Image: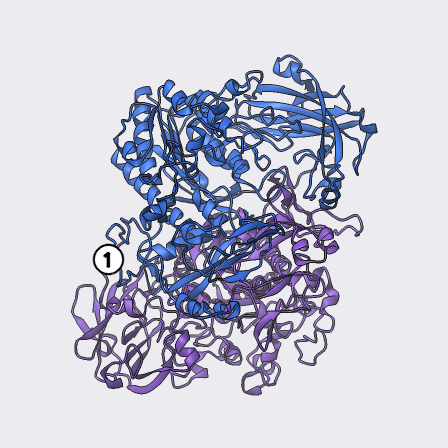
Chain colours: A blue, B purple
Amino acid sequence: MQRTLGVSLLCASLVYAQTYQRLGTCPSLGCVFPPDQANFLPGQLFDIRLEVHAPVNGSEAFNNGVPDEKFSFCIQVGDGECQDASSFFSVAEPVLSTYNFTWYEDLFAEEAETPSVVNVAAKSYRALSLAEPGEYKAILKYFGTQQTVARWQVRSTPKEAVAKNVLFFIGDGMTQSMITAARLIAHKSINGVYQSLMQMDQMEALGHQMTHSIDSYITDSANSATALYTGKKSTVNALNVYADSSSDPFDDPKFETIAELFRRRRHGPIGVVSTADIADATPAGLCSHTRLRDELPSIIFEFLYGAQALTPDVEWPTSCEGPDVLFGAGAEHFFPGEDSYNEEDFYAKFAAEGYEIVYNKTGLEATGVDQKTLGIFSTGNLAKWIDRNVWPENLVGGGASPLGDESDALDQPGLKDMVIKAINILQNRAQENGTGWFMMAEAASIDKMMHSLDYDRALGELLELDDTIRATIAHLEEIGEAENTLIVVTADHGHGFDIYGSTDTKYFASKDTDREKRNAVSVYQGSGLSGYTVEPESLPTNDTIVFGAQGPNFPVNWEPRYAFAAGMAAYPDHKETFKIAKTGPRTPAVKSDDGVIANEKDKPSGFHVGGNLDITQAQGVHSLTDVSVFANGPGSDKFRGVYNSIDIFYKIADALALGPEGKYEAC
Amino acid sequence: MQRTLGVSLLCASLVYAQTYQRLGTCPSLGCVFPPDQANFLPGQLFDIRLEVHAPVNGSEAFNNGVPDEKFSFCIQVGDGECQDASSFFSVAEPVLSTYNFTWYEDLFAEEAETPSVVNVAAKSYRALSLAEPGEYKAILKYFGTQQTVARWQVRSTPKEAVAKNVLFFIGDGMTQSMITAARLIAHKSINGVYQSLMQMDQMEALGHQMTHSIDSYITDSANSATALYTGKKSTVNALNVYADSSSDPFDDPKFETIAELFRRRRHGPIGVVSTADIADATPAGLCSHTRLRDELPSIIFEFLYGAQALTPDVEWPTSCEGPDVLFGAGAEHFFPGEDSYNEEDFYAKFAAEGYEIVYNKTGLEATGVDQKTLGIFSTGNLAKWIDRNVWPENLVGGGASPLGDESDALDQPGLKDMVIKAINILQNRAQENGTGWFMMAEAASIDKMMHSLDYDRALGELLELDDTIRATIAHLEEIGEAENTLIVVTADHGHGFDIYGSTDTKYFASKDTDREKRNAVSVYQGSGLSGYTVEPESLPTNDTIVFGAQGPNFPVNWEPRYAFAAGMAAYPDHKETFKIAKTGPRTPAVKSDDGVIANEKDKPSGFHVGGNLDITQAQGVHSLTDVSVFANGPGSDKFRGVYNSIDIFYKIADALALGPEGKYEAC
């Protein structure tokens, strides 16, 4: 609908559409967090942060740089009176803090090193909630006549849950063009008719979600995880907080996640699974609250002990209470050393809290289903599907052992192994408590491999995700939980990837110049048919790959003579051959004295591609496109159509009835 | 499902996945058209073509180059006996023809000019049909022991229509990333919440369709129009025929289109509307049958007189019977001259068949709704939305008058003008006959502008399409036909486009070197917010653009300081500034003695981007990605989910009940 915009937009033309922003979610000089347009689940915990800015210099300089310390703040319900916030929430008036920060107004200012200085007066209310659905106005008055109005909406939510369990799959960075490409290389087609389809293609509901950030139209994975898990958009790098202007990355105004709500309301077990460092943004987003996703050791601390323990002075009476399952990588945050919290041994700390700990696929398979379980299978991120399954020799020499002894991590599980085991543990623990369970499982390296223009590996990861979803549905049917379990599959953002033709790699190799090599690319009718599903005569039959509905569907030949030709919308300088990087993931570009340049060791026989990114970027970057949502099971019909990423949180919360009066009763 | 594959695949490993193919839909030496996996609507007319190939030389050389002229061909219904085709269809045995053709096996062969020669024996059965739903096998036996089995499926179709009218919108080349980008620049957002949405976002059903070709995974618009209109995939450049190996581009085996079926079964009026040359592939696809979409004069002939008149010796007893509405461009095929059929005056010929003819927007508005109407508004393609609405001076000097007198076409209608008028004419003519109507309306230049990397113009065209859909729904509600009308919106293929950041165009302009200019690009949080919806203070208020549900929603500023940074997966050498080309559509690359190079006159102040296409390509090319489908009205629920492009034909045909026993009765 078209709305008459409130005061908060009066200053918009000054600063909107600037790439450098004083504080993204606060275009005026008075800041209210949660900001205008924020949505809430009834009873969802959140902080309120108020800031009044007085810029000392620059285009916004005001009031000689003296902020108004006597600002007032009230809450208005519907058309009622605006009630002072402390009284409205029955809490003590928070202490005022004052400080300053600096920012650059544009690239010229940054280049000239002429920052703008802003003095600030601020207050934070902690751990509040609004139980009643409806429209609220939060009104900040300052500098006598100025005000900022934040219109908040507490959504209504059903009292009866339709889903007992939720399994939320995130294909990080996964766009529809990648799903299409994965189908092409892993499913057989005859005369334009696929003989089998991706599992995602066959889900009950299809939707699209808009991934943009609150204050920039391109998101990162922290910010988008926040939207998916809390129903609130935030700023790039922020996890479940609105980024404020203070320097402490842990005091920003928080809001409660789906995992915290599931613990607090349903008291059920939680699983967090990722093929990345388990402290990476997408898994971290379930349990962490910080403006800086890179605070990885603290994120591990928070998984185990919660935000309240991390910052004892800041009230936050909700947490994941230690996820029942935590499977992934990032071992360097667990064994004692410079990357672990206070250099302490977090394997020991998890064990002290009752966790079983497993370090490899064999251990994962062998461990029981009774205890909380931590599975950390390598340092960094897990090895990629292609390297684990096609060229396992690439794992040798990586020194990625989760024990931190620099031995190799050769016995790594895949996403499917982790998810099936996680289901069994959660299912067992939920039955003990008479609840359902909640799990997020991330195929993280779709994104990571797209960043490094390693399309083959990215598609391998995507196919592993699809294979995992297929196996999961079969497993849930087997254990009788399919009809109780809402499965949602989506991405957190895109990369501008697409296939546009094929490359005769033999012809390519026979040519010497960049322009001659490019003539190996054929388009339209010249793209021909996929060579990835045709078993080469020179190789033994691969009997682990089964084309068809039973799968698993993967390419049987990752090196066909006619390889797909693909490209990205955004890319650093790099070299291209269109052939798979056989010895391990690509590093397309490297830093030099003149900024980022093509890595001459990566695809040395390739032609040179000059980038279209700023020369600080050594990788591709995220893109704008809406991403697909697929859903199965109870509540899946709500995932049809086109909506905002934040809506996914409400749809899941509604399916689980996570409002104050919600409950689940088995049929 | 996983199928046991028939004989037709035994030779597959020889030629599958080759970019150069002897005959795309025929990997073996015996060819059956329609080929294996073909689907049919009951009673849909089609030709059968049989070819036996004997390669004289090359990797497939066989039988000393002598084809088997004594091949046999039979049809098997279900598990019954295979019956000789002439007897099965009760037709005379066709005459055998023999000839040869040549092809190149790969790029090396083409470079060395060493073609392979193939001798052929062939037969064609014309204008057959299968009335009974079910599984059929068409079996060709040749060279004694070889056979090719084509498994055909005649789908079942309802007897009762749910839709009276169908309006089929095609956004040529329109991907979800473009729809996302269009939303960004034309709809206002506050703190990550859009205050209005695209009309497409709000349709009742969302689906995805796979666009690949029958014999290549990248399609062109002819081939994809064929799939959408007939339920049969074909080969690049082919319109409603399977490409055979004979030299005549008009004798290939035909199949009936949705428009022909609507005429033959429903006897209702047809509309064809495009912003392109009306002989271009997407409009042509409704009524034409040829292997070569570039036979533009013949396509105009076929619109008016049908295929039977074009090739009197080839039986084809169905046609569009002259569409009731034909609106678009391509005037050079109408006024007498080298681009019109036999250099004749086709305005005169359309007039002689009873058509009203209009040449500009004023005439379009003024003309009545009783007669068949031809509206041709320029030579080539219509001017773009941006040039018509923002910089109309760009139309001056184009010499695009539809009269062919080289005066300017300054009074051109937009897609919305054409579609609303077309609805009124079709509605009036349908009421006369007591039928519903069928219309296809194409936003053609989304594709054309993406080809030339002119992202702004492409998005302008996309926004015009969305505005047209919005206005169409309102108009149908006004005339009481909304609940009778199935509206389907989709694309025919994609381009690998996406937005990945923003560019400070002021900073860009201040820098001299390519690498310094690139540093004007900012990503993630640096992308900031859209500047396109913020009215610049230096410009007068644009009161034709209204943000919100009522629209029309377009950018109010096409030249914000912070322009979006976007790129393509496939691109020729070109220069980039990220600023809109103000004086008219871009020409990013030009031919030189060394193949295609960047056009130094296009964005002369830009940085240079080296392409990733073969150096014969002066434009971007189509991509693989699935495209979105949106639908409203009766039958729209069938458009949910993921399916093949050919399924769109069956969904529309089912909504209209275009099978032999189908009928529409108003409630």
Quadrant where the C terminus of chain A sits is top left
Residue B592's place in the image compared with B100, above or below, is above
Number of numbered callouts drawn: 1
Note whether B615 is above or below A199 in the view shown.
below
Left or right, B348 with respect to A456, comes to right
> Quick check: can you spot residue A622?
yes
Q: Nearer the viewer, residue A323 or A635?
A: A323
Hey, which quadrant is residue A368 in on the image?
A: top left
Estimate the x, y position of residue A363 in percent, counting from the top left.
Answer: 28, 32
Closer-to-camera residue (B337/A321): A321
The residue that appears at 43% across and 65% down in the rendered structure is A503
Q: Chain of mark 1?
A: A
Give left or right: position of B83 versus B496: left
Q: Quadrant of residue A164?
A: top left
- The residue at which mark 1 appears reads as A540
Q: Residue at x 29, y 79 (%)?
A: B51
Image location (x, y in percent) of residue A411: 31, 39
Is label 1 in a helix, a strand or a loop?
loop
Task: Please identify the quadrant where the N terminus of chain A is shown.
Answer: top right
Q: Residue at x 36, y 63 (%)?
A: A192
Please provide percent x and percent y for residue B615: 53, 71
Q: Position of residue A185 (x, y in %)?
A: 37, 57
**Residue B327 appears in the rendering:** no
Between A444 and A188, which is closer to the camera in this rendering? A444
Q: Is residue A142 left or right of residue A571?
A: right
Q: Nearer the viewer, residue A162 or B470?
A: A162
